[in-house]
Amino acid sequence: MVVNDNSTDDTQDKVESFASKHDWITLLNITSSDSHLPGSKIINAFYKGFETLDDNYDVICKFDADLIFPKNYLETISSHFEKNKRLGMASGFCYIENNGEWVLENLTRKDHIRGALKAYRKACFLEIGKLKPSMGWDTVDELLAKYYGWSIFTDESLHVKHLKPTGVSYNKTAKYLQGEAMYKMRYGFVITFISALKLAYKKRSLLLFKDYMSGYLRAQKNKVEQLVTKKQGQFIRKIRWQGIKKRVM
């Protein structure tokens, strides 16, 4: 299922060409805001496609359009799910082009599956409540999967070319959403402070730290609805502290 949401290139023609040759390819044209915002816009587009499908699936994937996969990608991901019945999510690693070479994207790490290339076992997908239409959806899904006892796996041998680095086209409105997402996931102030500082450092902009903390404090002040329960929040903070201590030690 290819969801064509406000594309300005020849996506529709290309997909229709492939669909005429392969009956397992389907195109869905939708029109939403043309603003590049993380979170709700992406997941709402996903659900437009999801709602047209039946429930006859074992694994469901959410892939961005700007990816080039190795030829064995789906076969390898499938084999991981077959080998481990408690594997809830799996993926390869994102690489971006830098000075003519493909290098590991600096937001990539072994314990996190990038939002661009998610694959879920059906039972896990349903137990975590599917995908949340909010900034932070691609973090809270993993945390909830762990909460329910599912494992997560990233395969370092699967190098996926990511043609457009994460966040490159987000507009100014998005700058506070990262901090808001941390509030929604019940990180608490201290973990949000540490996470915001680390993320701003990775993106080479300390001004982003101010934006992230402002987003958190605004959400706290406005009592924005949170994505997880109090009990899930306790588990998430425990996981986050374990990760912080592991990196420090």
Image: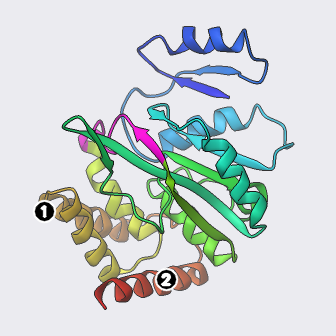
Residue 232 rendering spot, x and y as whole percentages: 59, 79
Q: How is the image coloured?
A: rainbow
* Residue in view at x 27 percent, y 64 percent: 199
- Are dots 1 and 2 in contact, CB under 8 Å? no
Q: Residue furthest right?
A: 56
Residue 58 rendering spot, x and y as whole percentages: 80, 50
Amino acid type at image mark 1: Leu
The residue that disc 2 covers is 239
Magenta stretch: helix, strand or loop mostly: loop
Q: Is residue 129 magenta?
A: no
Camera-side residue of 105 and 217:
105
Residue 197 lies left or right of residue 14; in this view the side is left
Q: Is residue 162 magenta?
A: yes
User: Can you see residue 205?
Assistant: yes
Residue 126 rendering spot, x and y as whole percentages: 75, 58
In the picture, the quarter occupied by the C terminus is bottom left
Camera-side residue of 237 and 220:
237
Q: Residues within 10 Å of mark 1 (few under 14, many from 20)?
A: some
Q: Secondary structure at mark 2?
A: helix
* Magenta-drawn segment: 159-172
Residue 240 rendering spot, x and y as whole percentages: 43, 80
Q: Secondary structure at mark 1?
A: loop
Amino acid type at image mark 2: Ile
Q: Residues within 10 Å of mark 2 (few under 14, many from 20)?
A: some
